[in-house]
Image (cartoon, helix red, strand yellow):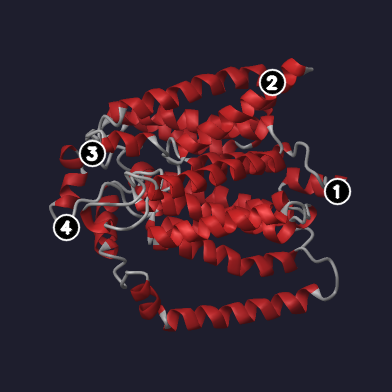
Amino acid sequence: MKIAIHKSIFEKGFVVLALLLFTDAFISLLRRQGGFVLDSTEGDPVMQVSLFGVYIVTLFLILLRWKKTVQAVQAEPLLMLLLAIALVSVLWSFAPMVTLRRSVALVGTTFFGVYLATRYSLKEQLQLLAWTLGIAALLSFLFALAPPHLGIHSEGGHIGAWRGIYVHKNALGRSMGLSIVLFSLYVLYQSKHRWIAWVGLVLSASLILLSTSATPLLSSLAVLSLLPLYSIWRWRNPLFLPFFIMVVTLGSVAALWLLSQAQAILGAAGRDFTFTGRTELWAILLQMIQKHPWLGYGYNAFWLGWKGESARVWNLLIWEPTYAHNGYFQLGLDLGLLGISVFVLGFLIYFGRALTWARVNQTVEGMFPLAYLTFLLPYNVTDSIILQQNNIFWVLYVSTIFSMVVQRNVEAKPSVIARETLNKGEYFKDA
């Protein structure tokens, strides 16, 4: 019994450490402080070795329960198809070796998400995620406030902005945006130990403001504004329809007001209608996608500095972006319309499944898939976290999708009818 407990604690510790690495914590910052200059083609060998260790351990843990893994993979053909396209893109890639190396890392990232879904219930996964993000928040405060204040930008165009345990303020903002969504769900839908959730929420909100990172803040606020609507969606009485219509109407009015005040809001966030030059970048990227519309340039084969096709983009801009600053454009560059089509089709199916999941699971984990997928939509407008290797957002996307299929150890189990509805894909049957 004691051995089993120790194994469980060790495994959970491994998961928390791996999730921290997937947020790009510690290593990149410490390497940068040590004078390391990142090569856009080769990457950081220390980070690669660390994540390779994570994938080796993950493979071992998957083999221990390989039957569940096989069953889960068979249940999600669209996501596996998207992964296969990324792997096969080495055949048409503009940088085959880069595509091969990074698509293999993508396989490792994806199957870490599968491992989470087959090993832990969604409730347990969210608890581990809360530990991860809570540790990241506390250490970010420590890195910023304690000498030599590594957690605050001291050079470049972001002097004074907090970055915590990350190499850039946007990485801190990204993690804290997710943290706000998660701890808000705990505040709203769980009565036990709610004060801990409040502490996590306040810490996360403080850090995201100190990071001056606008996109994750706006994305998390978008989710929070929709949570009342999603809560009404759970109702099963005659008042549902009129309340739903009322909330949608009020939401539309609020959206129109926000649009009318867009310039002032963006100005307060340090942005303008060009999203700090990103609209010019996107116009150029659209032209680049049109040159190879169907299959793209190969997975992760576009942004290779002056050595790759990205050089054509750099020649047309006064700055040198290293990614598309838009997840949908990035996917188009990587895998073309084929990849975009498979992703969009899958996302629509998963969103429908999340709607039903929220109605049959009156818990934090019941609401999380819907909240998380909602968070991803606006966030990917100005950042690129779709189908990214070594990335916590892709890990959570995979684990959330597979968790809704595996349905292990859910605190409030769905009825047999609801379970059959989820498995058959009839996601709107109860609507």
Which residue, given by chain and number where applicable, does mark 3 sit on?
304
> Is residue 160 rendered to the left or right of residue 414?
left
**Judging from the image, what secondary structure is the residue with disc 3 in?**
loop
Q: What element carries label 4?
A: loop
What's the residue type where badge 4 is placed? Leu
CB contact under 8 Å: marks 2 and 3: no
Residue 164 seen in this snapshot:
yes
Nearer to us of marks 2 and 3 is: 2
Q: Where the N terminus falls, by quadrant?
A: top right
Which three-letter amino acid code belongs to the residue tagged 1? Ile
Tell me the kind of residue under disc 3. Leu
- In primary-sequence order, the first of circles 1 and 2 is 2
- Disc 2 packing (10 Å; few <14; some 14–19; many ≥20): few
User: In the rendering, at what x and y percent does residue 308 appear?
Assistant: 20, 39
Q: In which quarter of the image is the C terminus?
A: bottom right
Q: In this view, does 108 lie to the left or right of 125?
A: left
Which numbered disc flags the more N-terminal residue, 2 or 3?
2
Closest to the observer, 199 or 70 = 199
Q: Name the residue under label 1.
A: 417
Residue 270 x %, y %: 32, 69
Counting from the top left corner in percent of width and height, residue 365 is at: 70, 49
Q: Can residue 295 be seen in this view?
A: no
Q: Which residue is drawn at 72% across and 65% down?
A: 231
Mark 4 surroundings: few (<14), some (14-19) or many (≥20) residues within 10 A: few
Which residue is identified by label 4? 317
Front tag of 4 and 2? 2
Q: Which residue was labeled with disc 2?
A: 6
The numbered mark, 1 or 3, whose residue comes first in the sequence reads: 3
Tell which of 51 and 62 is nearer to you.
Answer: 51
